[in-house]
Image (tube, rainbow, N blue to C red):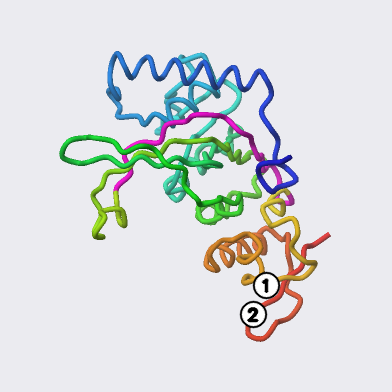
Amino acid sequence: MKMIESRLFRTPTPLELDRFERALSQVSYQRQLNGIGTRGEKTLHAVLKAMIDEDSTHHEQKIGPFVADVFDGERITEIQTRQFNTMRSKLDAFLPVVPVTIVYPMASRKWLVWLDPLTGEATKRRLSPKKPHPIQVVDELYKISAFLDHPHLSITIVFLELEEQRWLSGWSEDKKKGSRRHERIPIQLEGFISLRKPEDYLSLLPEDLPESFTSAMVAKYAKISVRTAQTALRLLERLHQIVSVGKDGRHKKFTRIG
């Protein structure tokens, strides 16, 4: 049974699982010896970089005025967890000359651990009840929507079981709301979705969505906020993958093209 709702979701191969385990072991060992490291690199970022390319000479390569996370001589890979808007200058420079893949990690299962900011003491980890949907990536993708139809750009969503460590530093009585994240530790590699051409982005919509739909319907079927659903439809409309077919009350109604 598929863990993630998308026709493009695929489970990892044995080779990919082996590479992930080696990367996780390598980064964990380095953390024990050296701590976080001179660049303050987060564990999740370091593990993904080591999994993508086991040759460390390909890591942190300077290309023009920018540093690429991974460059193997043929393709640049950038690992980006948020703030895709900061990628625009890099994409302007990289895409005319070399293919680029942006890797976006998403927690398919997330364990929460709370840390006391004074003592560092950690609570027992608990499984988060939140169930992610691939469509949530659109909140970041929309920030680089002008590049998404470029033939040299692809997006890979990597689904992982993660442990998320957060400081009890928030403003609510239990210190959880508004808290600050400390680390995300990968536990298991669970799958991928690769978006290589504009029509692939349709796979982010819920599979059981009716032929015509509104943003409210997308939000209901995917169990996401209406704001994220509206962002998804604006993105798909910009990529010419959906078209407006009238209104349902005050809400625009759309259907897939093709």
- Residue 30's spot in the image, x, y percent? 35, 15
As drawn, is 252 to the left or to the right of 116? right
- Tell me the kind of residue under disc 2: His
Report the disc number at residue 95. Answer: none
* Distance (Cα) linking label 2 and label 1: 6 Å
Q: Identify the mark nearer the N-term, 2 or 1.
A: 1
**Label 1: which residue?**
214
The residue sitting at 58% across, 35% down in the picture is 100
Report the disc number at residue 251. Answer: 2
The residue sitting at 74% across, 40% down in the picture is 1
Q: Secondary structure at mark 1?
A: loop
The residue sitting at 69% across, 24% down in the picture is 13
- The one nearer the camera, 196 or 255, is 255
Q: Which residues are magenta?
A: 180-199
Residue 183 is a magenta residue: yes
The residue sitting at 42% across, 42% down in the picture is 126
